[in-house]
Image (cartoon, grey):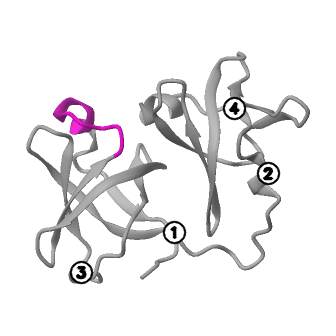
Amino acid sequence: MAYPAGILLGKIIKSYGFNGTVTVNLEKVFDGKIPEMESVFLETEGKAVPFLVSSCEIIDNTLIRITFDGYNSLEQISEFIGCRLYLTSSVKPENSGNDLNRLTGYQVRTIENDIVGTISEIIENPGQILLDILTSRDKKILIPLHQDFIVRIDNKKKIITMDLPEGLLEINE
């Protein structure tokens, strides 16, 4: 079952254990019918930030427990308490050409010429395209592919230089 991006899944109400798992109070519309999720958007400071889902456990019709990829301690997820979660969609737009897939393997750098990582996958959601980037520390991060962030694309060297919003990379760590 796939939902369009922007559908409110629920709200993080508390942490669970010490391994970075959070408990989410589901919106009534789901009533225990949770789609398989590879990623979600977490609303922090009024902005939707993408996160990869490591595991999702259904507790009952109103609660689920989610662990985010790369978040494995209570300290890392404590600031997420009270944040809303939104679903992404696994449905690709009809006219999603392979033009974006050619960016797989490109290196992403900041305007300060710092290496962010290498694009391992392009995730196409309705209204939002995400770059799944593998860092040099073997961590995955998601960055929205938006024309305002792109400074230049060097097709010969396979490098994309981006001017990323302050704090975006730190949120993904």
The magenta segment is 69-78
Q: Position of residue 157 (x, y in %)?
A: 86, 28
Residue occupied by mark 1: 5
Residue 62 drawn in magenta: no
Instruction: Determine the CA span between mark 1 and mark 2.
Output: 24 Å
Answer few, some or many: residues within 10 Å of disc 2's Cα (few below 14, many 20 plus, some between 14 and 19).
Answer: few
The disc label shown at residue 102, or none: 2
Quarter the N terminus occupies: bottom left
Residue 28 numbered tag: 3
Q: Residue at x 78, y 75 (%)?
A: 95
Q: Earlier in the sequence, mark 2 or mark 4?
A: 2
| Gap between marks 3 and 4 measured at Cα | 40 Å
Sequence order check, earlier mark of 4 and 1: 1
Residue 115 percent location from the top left of the image: 65, 22
Camera-nearest label, 1 or 3: 1
Residue 47 visible in the displayed image: no
Res. 100 mark: none
Give the label on residue 108, or none.
4
CA distance for labels 2 and 3 = 40 Å
Residue 139 in percent (x, y) is at 45, 33
- The residue depicted at 64 percent of the width and 34 percent of the height is 118
Q: Earlier in the sequence, mark 1 or mark 2?
A: 1
Residue 141, compared with residue 3, is above or below; it is above
Q: Residue at x 62, y 51 (%)?
A: 121
